[in-house]
Amino acid sequence: MTEASPARVLNSDLPLSPADDAAHSIGPLALAAHRFLLWLRSPRPYLMLVGFTLFIGFWYLAVEVWKLPRFSEMPGPTVVVREWFSRNPTYGLSIFTPEYYMHIWVSTRRVAIAFFLATAIGVPLGLFLGWSERFKQYIFPVFELLRPIPPLAWVPLAIVMFKGSETPIIFLTFLASFYATALNTMLGVESIDVSYTRAASCLGATRWQVFLHVIVPGSMPFIFTGLQISVGVAWFSLVAGEMVSGQYGLGYVINTSYTMVRYPTIVIGMITLGIVGYATSAIVRLVGAYLMQWRTRELALGGDR
Amino acid sequence: MSVRPAATHINLAVSAQPTRKGSVRITDVVKVYGAAGAGVLAVDHCTFDVPPGEITVVVGPSGCGKTTLLNAIAGFHSISSGSIHLDDELLCGPQKLKARPGPDRIVVFQNGALFPWKTNIENVTFGPIMQGLLSRAEAYEKARDMMADAGLRGIEHNYPGEISSGVRRRVEIVRALMNGPKILLLDEPYRALDSLTKSVMHEALLEIFYKSRVTIFFITHDLEEAIFLGHRVVIMTTRPCRPKKILDIDIPHPRDYSVLTAKRFREFMDETAAAVHEEAIKAFAAGEKER
């Protein structure tokens, strides 16, 4: 038998002495920086810019230059941008008015509370649904019956059930998030290869240890997919809730601006929703990448499985 | 330099049991899937012994029911009748149709089952830590020694996804050996590997076996692999599965790849190839799906 160990032969790119251990563990920050540089060097950022240019260009031409029939009442990009960045906005809302940030804050706070509740309840529920067949038989039919009911249909009951204007909105925002999180978590548990739970029981793990060390980390990828969907739908149903009741928030801005014919402010509200929504879902993605370094590293460095 | 206490110096050789343990006796085992009467007969009155401290290889066409047998020993599935003993201790029998999985019989899975969310050393130390047998520090020290002994130095803090599939299999075997099992149950572990990697893996497995002398129960559909590795080769009929031929391979251990061209090896191949081929044709005719 030769001296060269198979590990060495098969993995010549891996450092094999223990001294290299520290150098070899790649931190999440270094990985993020590396990926950002790769991204800058790829054609993707420039294609993205072209995409945005085409979109805004069409908007500009359609509304402000060609004045297409159904577009004539629409605010054009120059009007919106001028209003958005004006120190003295015509309709009272721009990046220089404190109300703008108040609306963003109120909406973000509602989403944060609802998202937190949906995660705190949805993840454990999903884990147990996937883990215990009996529990699933009790709960899942009810869950599946309630799930297709759109949050908007809950508006009257939400107002009857909860006091004030804040809790009903949070409840509506919570609902859709909760379904997405619980369902994806359950699917995550069910997606775990039976070999992993079998291996754990071979190695002497108790049922509870299997839950903690196999079920929870094994469903993490699905949980975070669920959480990303969950933040998205939270914004969705938040706006629906805010249009119905409440005195602050981006949905409220859009709705009142419509009744008061402040069209540029509607667009400001919409763009702001897009940006804030994107930011929150990016945060969830980053947290996921941090918690699932095994996965990030696998995808980044390439396992050969 | 301080002298290490003998108890903490553990490597593959020392952790092996001085008296050979790990014999399995399979007696008249029957497994029917589905309702009795209407079910599919997977294992049909199967009787043979797995001698302790040796490698027993079970060969049969894909889907013949050999994995069913392994799952019964491991405790993942029940049997319908018969009994299985491990060192005279009843694993499953008429009163108790399903064995309890435990660290005395550890399975190395077909597609590998290292937890991808744990680093290699966290995987290797999983058994002793879960069972509360060793502290984290003790487990890590033992794991580092055993991994070094198996040529796996320097990948302790990598995730399984970062190493090649061949190396993953070795880590998985070390993870099993950490528990001092009586028997290793290998379920076609090298099936997904290319033939070059496979040959490296065979020698690596033998190397680990010579150091640990743990009983190995190995399932494959590759006859050459079976004769190369096994002290004993059990050729199974296609479903329902039953031993068709049991051979004791008298090629001396330790073996290496020069065995493949040896005259005795060819004789064993000639003697068995027809039997295996016959079963493969039957399996094909029965329309058995690859599984």
Image (cartoon, coloured by chain):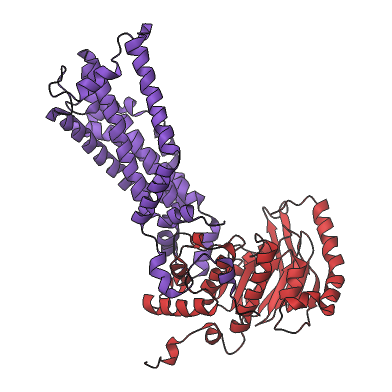
Chain colours: A purple, B red
Would you say B85 lies left or right of A95 here? Answer: right
Tell me if A95 is positioned left or right of A278 in this view.
left
Front residue of B89 and B251: B251
| Rendered location of residue A50, percent (x, y) | 41, 29
Compared to residue B159, the image places residue A129 above or below, namely above
Residue B179 visible in this rendered orientation of the protein: no
Q: Nearer the viewer, residue A36 or B79?
A: A36
Closest to the observer: B22 or A278? A278
Q: In this view, does B78 lie to the left or right of B116?
A: right
Q: Position of residue B173 (x, y in %)?
A: 56, 72
Considering every residue shown, the one lying at the far front of the view is: A41
User: Which residue is at a point 41% across and 51% down the rendered structure image?
Assistant: A220
Q: Is residue B286 above or below residue A90?
A: below
Q: In which quarter of the image is residue B206?
A: bottom right
Tell me what residue is drawn at x 74 percent, y 71 percent: B226
x and y percent of residue B265 in the render? Answer: 81, 76
* Left or right of A249 in this view: B181: right
Q: In which quarter of the image is the C terminus of chain A?
A: bottom right
Label count reads 0
In the picture, residue A109 is in which quadrant?
Answer: top left
- Across and down, in percent, residue B277 comes to 84, 62
Q: In which quadrant is the N terminus of chain A drawn?
A: bottom right
